[in-house]
Amino acid sequence: MTLSGDGLSMGFDGELVLEGVSIDVDAGEVLTVVGPSGTGKTTLLRLLAGFHPPDAGTIAWDGTDVWALSESERLSIRRGISMVFQEPSLFNATVARNVTYGSRIRRSWRDRIRAQLDGLVGDSSLSEGARSALEVVGLTGKADQNALSLSGGEGQRVAFARAMAVDPSVLLLDEPTSNLDPRNTAVLEEAVLRARDRGVGVVVATHDMHQAERISDRVAVLLAGELVERGPAAQIFEEPEDRRTKRFVDGELMYDVEETGERDESSESHDAYSTAPR
Ligand SMILES: Nc1ncnc2c1ncn2[C@@H]1O[C@H](COP(=O)(O)OP(=O)(O)OP(=O)(O)O)[C@@H](O)[C@H]1O
């Protein structure tokens, strides 16, 4: 399985947000898309998820252009892709129901009726996939608790479990740990690595280079809607080819930047950068 975007451009209200971005993720790897806030990471993930077509470029699943397919063919591809948003958007229901939600709506009517009947005779509605997803994020003990009563970090862990419970081939995570404490962050990062080890292709959008360094197999650096460099984690962190990558790795580029013509160490004007913390 390979999910790829080739030459992706996207704009809103006449403003170009992504320009000519090419990216791909394979089964069993973690690709992080790193870049400052507002640089187009969410937009890129939404295109990869197939929510809407790009203005230019193609999204392909194993080489097949998904927007050239019929709606039902595209839907069957989208079933293999799970996305976790920056805000977990949980329902006013138990953790168990939240985690099984995705699998329930993907089931056939016959299976849904059978599950309802199982529920009537007291069988737990937590499927094997949902149970194992909750176990991965360490929340099995909270299955019967209302999801809205959880802490922010636990809520993100439930959202992750819900995305994993449908057994996706690709998992897209948008800033999964922003605003989380170190313990919740560590649980989610471990869960990402376990998903990868189970053969899932994981794309993580993050502005946190330390996180990228901990979990990435490969890294794509997105600055001002342009993919300035991509490569194995060791290259990006130790021997970046692009000067902008080095500055971002070094924590100097915290905001979105507009800059041109790089790979040149001689023009060291810093005026174009914002170096203030977020
Ligand atoms: N539906 C939309 N309509 C109008 N503008 C949009 C839309 N979606 C994104 N944008 C704009 O595109 C730019 C990039 O946004 P995007 O959310 O992709 O960035 P990001 O890198 O994910 O940032 P953050 O990490 O802060 O979420 C922003 O200027 C945003 O306002």
Image (cartoon, helix red, strand yellow):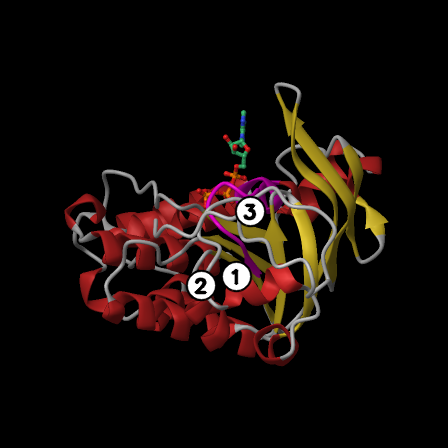
Q: Is residue 142 magenta?
A: no
The answer to whether the residues at label 1 and label 2 have Cβ atoms under 8 Å apart is yes
Visible residue check, residue 158: yes
Q: Which mark is residue 82?
A: none
Badge 1 density bin: few <14, some 14–19, many ≥20, Cα 10 Å: many
Q: Nearer the viewer, mark 3 or mark 2?
A: 2
Say which of 164 and 143 sits in front.
164
Tell me what residue is drawn at x 62 percent, y 72 percent. 236
Say which of 70 and 236 sits in front.
236
Counting residues from the start of the chain, the first of labels 3 and 2 encountered is 3
Structural distance between the alpha carbons of marks 1 and 3: 15 Å
Tell me what residue is drawn at x 27 percent, y 66 percent. 184
Q: Secondary structure at mark 3?
A: helix
x and y, in percent, of residue 253 in the image: 49, 55
Q: Is 191 placed above or below 57 here?
A: below
Q: Which mark is residue 251?
A: 2
Structural distance between the alpha carbons of marks 1 and 2: 5 Å
Say which of 251 and 10 sits in front.
251
> Where is mark 3, residue-wise?
41
Does the Cβ of the disc 3 residue fall within 8 Å of ligand 1? Answer: yes
Q: Which mark is residue 248?
A: 1
x and y, in percent, of residue 35 in the image: 53, 54
Does the Cβ of the disc 2 residue fall within 8 Å of ligand 1? Answer: no
What are the residue bounds of the magenta stretch? 33-46
